[in-house]
Image (cartoon, rainbow, N blue to C red):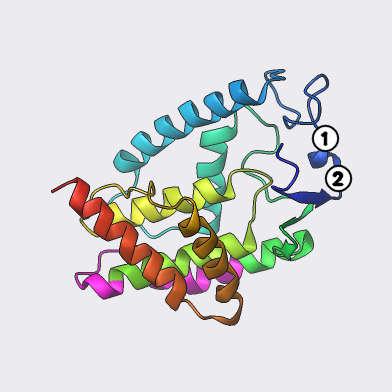
């Protein structure tokens, strides 16, 4: 694990695989090399993404339970806690995500509010689509419900929503360097329900996606 990626405290979810020098979370396949685990997670994500385009119709409305199932479908063969809400508190660069004890109630609120309002994401108006993507993504990342893979889960959910809206699968390749710092700032701005920074980011993501697929 990168030292500055996450600070964790709490239960055994913080354990790393013996022999991995603290770089790989304890896993079901006894992988000790980070590069190997990254590859396994990536391969599993490709599969669950492809399956998602078949499993979730344009009229599907997401629930918190379905997000847990999706997370388990992705990482269930690698980690025994996949699909369950995290039991450890997490922060990134000094910014704390939701306390672990609050996650069940926060995800319940997330389902009744943002997920109910914005999924299925079958809006016709471009601005409404980017608004939906930004708000759902921002709130999900702030909760950070899982021990690992929240960013990728957030991008997967946004991609499924985009496809529901008739867009191609989203291309997040432009979020690097300075843009990555802007993204992290946008996440923090969402604490005060200021979603405009994240909306601008998704506007650029959609624009990039359409240009590449033109």
**Nearer-the-camera pick, 171 or 99:** 171
Query: Which element type, helix, strand or loop, lies under badge 1?
Result: loop
Quarter of the image where the N terminus is located: top right
Residue at coordinates 57% horizontally, 48% vertically from top-left? 68
Residue marked by disc 2: 11
Instruction: Report the predominant secondary structure element of the magenta stretch.
Output: helix
In magenta, the rendered stretch is 108-128
Residue at coordinates 28% horizontally, 50% vertically from top-left? 57
In the depicted structure, whether residue 117 falls above or below residue 21: below
Residue 24 appears at what percent x and percent y?
A: 72, 29
Cβ–Cβ under 8 Å for marks 1 and 2? no
Note whether residue 58 is visible: no
In this view, the residue farthest toward the left is 214
Residue 3 appears at what percent x and percent y?
A: 75, 42
Residue 49 appears at what percent x and percent y?
A: 39, 38
Residue at coordinates 45% horizontally, 73% vertically from top-left? 197
Q: For residue 110: magenta? A: yes
Q: Choose mark 1 or mark 2, whichever is in front.
A: 1
Left or right for 120, reference 183: left
Left or right for 191, reference 211: right
Residue marked by disc 1: 15
The Cα–Cα distance between marks 1 and 2, rounded to whole angstroms, is 8 Å
**Nearer-the-camera pick, 44 or 214:** 214
Left or right for 124, reference 177: left
**Nearer-the-camera pick, 113 or 195:** 195
In the depicted structure, whether residue 150 falls above or below residue 126: above
Q: Residues within 10 Å of mark 2 (few under 14, many from 20)?
A: few
In the depicted structure, whether residue 34 falls above or below residue 205: above
Left or right for 110, reference 201: right
């Amino acid at each position: 694990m990168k030292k500055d990626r996450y600070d964790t405290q709490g239960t055994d979810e913080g354990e790393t695989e013996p022999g991995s020098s603290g770089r790989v979370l304890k896993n079901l396949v006894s992988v000790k090399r980070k590069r190997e685990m990254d590859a396994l997670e990536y391969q599993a994500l490709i599969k669950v993404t492809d399956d998602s385009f078949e499993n979730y119709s344009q009229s599907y409305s997401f629930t918190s339970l379905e997000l847990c199932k999706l997370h388990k479908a992705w990482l269930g063969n690698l980690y025994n806690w996949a699909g369950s809400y995290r039991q450890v508190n997490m922060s990134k660069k000094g910014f704390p995500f939701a306390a672990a004890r609050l996650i069940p109630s926060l995800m319940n609120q997330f389902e009744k509010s943002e997920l109910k309002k914005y999924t299925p994401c079958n809006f016709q108006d471009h601005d409404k689509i980017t608004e939906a993507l930004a708000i759902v993504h921002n709130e999900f990342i702030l909760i950070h419900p899982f021990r690992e893979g929240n960013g990728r889960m957030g991008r997967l959910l946004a991609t499924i929503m985009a496809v529901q809206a008739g867009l191609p699968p989203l291309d997040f390749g432009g979020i690097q360097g300075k843009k990555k710092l802007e993204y992290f700032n946008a996440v923090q701005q969402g604490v005060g329900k200021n979603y405009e920074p994240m909306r601008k980011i998704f506007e650029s993501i959609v624009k990039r996606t359409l240009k590449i697929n033109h």
